[in-house]
Image (cartoon, coloured by chain):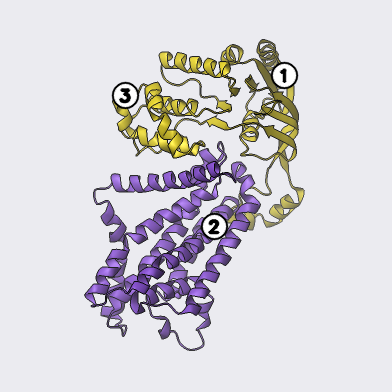
């Protein structure tokens, strides 16, 4: 692939992401605050539910919550938007040839941006608990971002593609993502899971990824096995997503 | 650039699945399970193009006419490579730019200037190359200060003018035009036609699909008539248009095989 073509693909992703961000930040008064308000509102309601009412035994529950909830919302928002990635761009797909997978990638990167601007809020929670993020944590952050980006892109690509052939998928995806949230240790610590159900965590890629984020923010270190597990899941998701996409993308213009 | 035709169709056949393989809805599948399964087996399909062969020479303006459903858009889709033929081969030489329908690839909350960048990159240029053309595009569009306003503030004619201005500044080797010549007021239409004439002079290959037979006669060097997915005739635009009119009259007279 020539340098010119690669430069064009890079620019395609850039203008597609820039489009979403510009629209989002221009047409609303609150702009940047919206990136924070949405996850914070959920964090607040879960805090009331699980700390105040259910009294989960964790001193730093608010901090614990945001370190899992913010990355989860990146994932969930990307998955929710993915099913429309191709359908909403039908007029382009029917007329212009370009790698359609970039539409999905731009969507995931857009949500990644909103996650990244919420990281300072997590840091504020850390400082409140008199913890200063370690240098190791800062160094690991890009790696875990990459792992979650690849995983989310893989899943989103598979969903966006399959949704063209099976339109009920977008409704199923919403339900499955919601259920997935509750079986992933986001609201509760993984060590509260009763013995015998530990496999739920190992069979769940998002449990591994959320585990990485918790390790990074709460302990300043991530166990190698957990990092390896998350990385392996992300590569599997990417491989499967791309395989499905490559097998079917030549028919998109007939279907959208 | 190599010699030979800019576009070459050889025995091109394109089917669309009618039932099987299209997007399926869970309710339909469950409610009509036996029917759905047998439909999958039958593999019903609609033949949009049937063994079509033609060449378009470099720098030629080629018109495609025919009734609705005769295969015109499928032909353009195959040239643009968004569709893949079931049989036969499609070859093209050079960079292809389609002229998009009104507003496609634009975002109405972005300004005209931002949309030039978005549309230019979507249509195949790098940001650097779009930047180098922005001034020309703005000038050609005659939108003036409105270029800094969001597209929401534009009339549909203005949006079309902006779209046309971007498309004709992409320096394509092959320009695909699908029924979008009638943009803007009369003055702007004349400007568009002048620009098309310039393209012809500059050896840009053009494929025009239009129901405006006058445009086909005045802008094209050659034309093709599609009828029910088959190539009925290729030749001088006047003759092809005359044959098309004759067939339309025959259809209206009684055989009544009008397309969908």
Mark yes or no: residue B243 visible: yes
Q: Quadrant of the N terminus of chain B?
A: top right
Chain under disc 1: B
Q: Nearer the viewer, residue A165 or B44?
A: A165
Q: Residue at x 43, y 47 (%)?
A: A14
Q: Position of residue A47 (x, y in %)?
A: 28, 74
Colour of chain A in the image = purple
Secondary structure, mark 2, is: helix
Mark 1, Cα crowd under 10 Å, few <14 / some 14-19 / many 20+, is: some
Q: Earlier in the sequence, mark 3 or mark 1?
A: 3
Q: On screen, A13 above or below A223?
A: above
- Image check: B233 left or right of B68? right
Residue that mark 2 sits on: A159
Residue A205 horizontal side relative to residue A219, left or right: right
- Within 10 angstroms of label 3, few (less than 14), some, or many (20 or more) residues? few
Numbered label attached to residue B234: 1
What crowding class fits label 2: few (fewer than 14 Cα within 10 Å), some (14-19), or many (20 or more)? many
- Can you give x and y, in whole percent of width and height, for residue B125 in the image? 49, 36
Question: Are marks 1 and 2 in one subunit?
Answer: no
Rendered residue at 59%/62% (across/down) = A239
Task: Give me the C-alpha separation between circle 1 and circle 2.
Answer: 44 Å
Residue B144, which numbered label?
3
Q: Is residue B212 visible?
A: no
Q: Which chain is yellow?
A: B
């Amino acid at each position: 692939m020539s340098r010119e073509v690669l430069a064009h693909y890079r620019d395609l992703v850039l203008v597609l992401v820039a489009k979403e961000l510009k629209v989002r930040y221009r047409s609303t008064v609150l702009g940047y605050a919206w990136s924070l308000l949405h996850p914070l509102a959920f964090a607040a309601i879960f805090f009331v539910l699980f700390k105040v009412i259910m009294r989960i035994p964790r001193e730093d529950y608010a901090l614990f919550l945001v370190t899992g909830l913010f990355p989860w919302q990146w994932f969930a928002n990307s998955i929710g938007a993915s099913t429309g990635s191709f359908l909403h761009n039908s007029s382009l797909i029917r007329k212009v040839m370009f790698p359609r997978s970039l539409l999905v990638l731009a969507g995931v990167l857009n949500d990644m941006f909103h996650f990244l601007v919420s990281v300072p809020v997590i840091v504020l929670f850390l400082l409140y608990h008199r913890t200063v993020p370690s240098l190791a944590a800062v160094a690991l952050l890009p790696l875990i971002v990459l792992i979650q980006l690849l995983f989310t892109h893989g899943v989103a690509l598979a969903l966006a593609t399959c949704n063209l052939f099976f339109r009920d998928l977008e409704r199923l995806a919403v339900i499955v993502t919601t259920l997935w949230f509750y079986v992933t240790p986001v609201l509760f610590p993984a060590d509260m899971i009763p013995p015998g159900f530990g496999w739920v965590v190992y069979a769940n890629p998002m449990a591994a990824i959320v585990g990485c984020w918790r390790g990074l923010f709460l302990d300043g270190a991530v166990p190698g096995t957990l990092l390896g597990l998350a990385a392996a899941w992300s590569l599997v998701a990417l491989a499967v997503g791309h395989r499905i996409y490559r097998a079917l993308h030549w028919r998109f213009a007939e279907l959208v | 650039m190599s010699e030979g035709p800019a576009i070459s169709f050889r025995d091109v056949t394109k089917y669309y699945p009618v039932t099987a393989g299209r997007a399926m809805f869970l309710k339909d599948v469950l409610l009509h399970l036996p029917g759905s399964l047998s439909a999958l087996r039958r593999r019903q399909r609609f033949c949009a193009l049937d063994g079509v062969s033609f060449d378009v020479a470099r720098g030629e303006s080629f018109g495609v006419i025919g009734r609705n459903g005769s295969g015109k858009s499928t032909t353009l889709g195959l040239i643009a490579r968004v569709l893949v033929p079931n049989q036969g081969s499609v070859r093209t030489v050079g960079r292809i730019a389609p002229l998009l329908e009104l507003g496609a690839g634009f975002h109405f909350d972005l300004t005209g200037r931002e949309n030039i960048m978005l549309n230019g990159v979507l249509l195949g240029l790098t940001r650097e190359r779009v930047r180098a053309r922005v001034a020309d595009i703005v000038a050609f569009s005659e939108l003036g200060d409105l270029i800094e306003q969001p597209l929401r503030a534009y009339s549909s004619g203005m949006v079309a003018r902006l779209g046309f201005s971007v498309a004709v500044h992409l320096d394509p080797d092959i320009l695909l035009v699908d029924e979008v010549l009638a943009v803007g007021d009369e003055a702007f239409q004349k400007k568009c036609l002048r620009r098309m004439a310039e393209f012809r002079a500059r050896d840009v290959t053009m494929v025009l699909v239009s129901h405006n037979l006058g445009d086909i006669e005045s802008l094209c060097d050659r034309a093709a008539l599609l009828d029910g997915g088959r190539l009925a005739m290729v030749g001088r635009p006047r003759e092809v248009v005359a044959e098309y009119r004759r067939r339309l009259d025959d259809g209206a007279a009684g055989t009544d095989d009008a397309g969908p």
